[in-house]
Amino acid sequence: MLNPAHDEFNGYRYYADTDLERITVIMGYRAIGMSLEAIRNILQDRANSTEHLLAQRDMLQRKIAAYGRMLETIEHLLEDTMAPKNEQLSAAEKAEIMGEGFSLAHQQEAQERYGKTDDWAEYQRRTASMDRADWQNGKQQVDKVEQALVEAFNRGVQPGSEEANALAERHRASLFFFEVTPAKHAILARGYVEDARFKAHYEKLAIGLAEWLRDVIYENARAHGIDPQEATWG
């Protein structure tokens, strides 16, 4: 593509000014990624230089777009790898936040009874992504509901009333580890009285609260068309 004007005895090649201009053109084309063959064609036929440059521009634009997508992918990957990982809590740490019901012994008992159910799988899925802040927030929500229950109980709110049903719904929503239907809620309410551990928890808040809460949940279940005595888990 480039021939020297003449060679000297010392082996150096000397180029004319027109050759230097040609070198500048070649280097410019190479800088935009053009192949030597394409540059040779342009130099041989300057009339087609515009066509070659347009083609090269299109190719570069496609590469820029591709590199942009690659860069975006890298940014997403960096966000994932650099994001703080959830702090997985031990059973003891969960029990410290949520109470004795989340101790290792209670968790093992629950797994033995419910480990093959869809609800247990859902519980595992939801809690797998929970960090300490999530558990603390969940406990705060439970505490607020229980405070509202105690306050209503002390005021003599009657099970089946509109206020009591609203409280039952708040309590049901606070059981956020899996979907608790009104029927399941009624079954759980039995345990609040029949299981000494649950009863002790509610009786510690207010004497008689366990039976009252069970009745509140039962009446709310009836409002949903569920007979609490005949309710099944399925």
Image: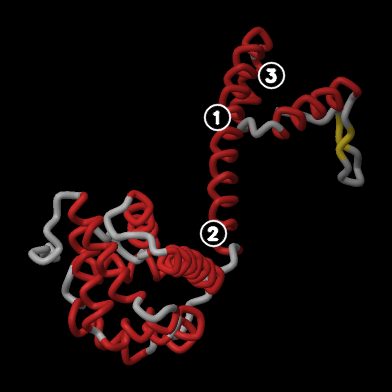
Question: Does 158 sit above or below residue 111?
Answer: above
Could you say which disc has been placed on residue 43 in the image? Answer: 3
Which mark is first along the chain, 1 or 3? 3
Name the residue rendered at 15%, 63% in the picture: 228
Which mark is first along the chain, 2 or 3? 3
Could you say which disc has been placed on residue 62 in the image? Answer: 1
Name the residue rendered at 17%, 70% in the picture: 117
Q: Nearer the viewer, mark 3 or mark 1?
A: 1
Q: Position of residue 45 (x, y in %)?
A: 64, 12
Q: Position of residue 50 (x, y in %)?
A: 65, 12
In the picture of the structure, the residue carrying the numbered disc 2 is 80
Q: Nearer the viewer, residue 209 or 46?
A: 209
Residue 35 falls in image quadrant: top right
Q: CA distance from mark 3 to mark 2?
A: 50 Å
Query: Residues at badges 3 and 1 in contact (C-beta under 8 Å)?
Result: no
Name the residue rendered at 73%, 34% in the picture: 31
Q: Nearer the viewer, residue 170 or 108?
A: 170
Give SS at disc 1.
Answer: helix
Q: Nearer the viewer, residue 99 or 38?
A: 99
| Residue 130 visible in the picture | no
Query: Residues at badges 3 and 2 in contact (C-beta under 8 Å)?
Result: no
Q: Nearer the viewer, mark 1 or mark 2?
A: 2
Could you say which disc has been placed on residue 158 in the image? Answer: none
Name the residue rendered at 45%, 85% in the picture: 95
In the rendered view, does 84 fall on the left or right side of 11? left
- Considering every residue shown, the one lying at the far bottom of the view is 105
Residue 69 falls in image quadrant: top right
* Residue type, mark 3 in image: Leu
* Residue type, mark 1 in image: Arg
* Residue type, mark 2 in image: Asp
Give SS at disc 3.
Answer: helix
